[in-house]
Amino acid sequence: MKNENVQRTVLGDVEVIRVVEWQGPLVPARGFVPESTAEMWKDNEHWLAPDHWHPESDKAVVALQSWVLRSGGRTVLVDTGVGNGRERPGSPHFHHWQGDFLGRLAEAGVRPQDVDVVVNTHLHIDHVGWNTTGAEGEWIPTFPNAEYLIPAADDFHYGPDNGYGKGRQEDDRLLYEDSIAPIHRAGRAVLWDGVHRIDDNLTLEPAPGHTPGSSVLRLASGTDRAVFVGDLLHSPVQILHPSCNSCFCLDQDQAAASRRRILERAAAERELVVPAHFAGPGAMEVRKEGNGFALEAWASYDNGNGMTALRG
């Protein structure tokens, strides 16, 4: 039987494994993307519903997921979800969350000790939670053999040197203390800025705005191209209207500029766009259309023998 929680494909010489911990309707659509209008959702209902929007409840559908990349003989984990049992009083959806992230990784054939590199695309609570696990009241790295690639700008913004983002949210302090500081103490943190090359196939680049250190991970192998965009996109509505930010973007103008820049390149170079939270197929090709962009094709997985296009 097909496992919808673990999906595989190959891009060039890189195996890509999608690991879905949870997906479903989560938040009001226009609360999620405040600059969007009711018409934007309704006019595109034929392809937004049901994978990305539930018209009946007017809620956006969200996936909590990570991506495993097997590249150059190493295992790279992109983002680590919410984490279990975390104190997140400002985020009711994720407060004391209980999920089966490690079980889903095991279904994908990945044990914690197998991971060589952890990429945190940015330091938000749903991207760093499984960086650590609790042991006798102490937080230790979940992936003991991995180096953790952390954007330096986010480490500064959320870390104690900048007063936990100048005290914006208590959750920021808690996040840093349980999911980032233990990585530093264990000597596993690698802070990067500018451009950071992981290997011949994978490169990290800054795309600030959502957070100061928000980043994208580019995959280029053979003739295949993909860009893992983190939270640059939260909803497909933002493909059509790239000036629309999510409610979580700290610098609205910068986030919109980064989004447009990344989508421009993706359309020009036929990069597969892989957002952190898209449900349904979870990845797509885009094309330029008017002042924005349009869906060219959804990704379709075929159990590791390559990725095909499923036209929208």
Image (cartoon, rainbow, N blue to C red):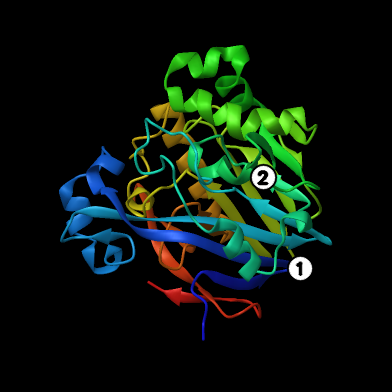
Residue at image point 24% right, 53% down: 59
Residue that carries the numbered disc 2 in the rendered image: 119
Amino acid type at image mark 2: Val
The 10 Å Cα crowd at callout 2, few under 14, some 14 to 19, many 20 or more, is many
Residue at image point 66% right, 80% down: 305
Task: Tell me residue 239's x, y (percent).
Answer: 38, 52
Residue 186: numbered disc = none
Choose top left, top right, bottom left or bottom right for residue 171: top left
Give the quarter of the figure containing the C terminus.
bottom left
Task: Tell me residue 170's x, y (percent).
Answer: 44, 22
Q: What element carries label 1?
A: loop
The 10 Å Cα crowd at callout 1, few under 14, some 14 to 19, many 20 or more, is some
Which residue is farthest bottom?
1
308 lies above or below 86: below
68 lies above or below 86: below
Task: Tell me residue 233's x, y (percent).
Answer: 43, 47
Mark 1 vs mark 2: which is more N-terminal? 1
Residue that carries the numbered disc 1 in the rendered image: 13
Task: Tell me residue 106's x, y (percent).
Answer: 65, 66
Amino acid type at image mark 1: Asp
**Front disc: 1 or 2:** 2
122 lies above or below 292: above
Choose top left, top right, bottom left or bottom right for residue 121: top right
Any part of residue 83 in sight = yes
Q: How far apart are marks 1 and 2 (CA)?
A: 19 Å
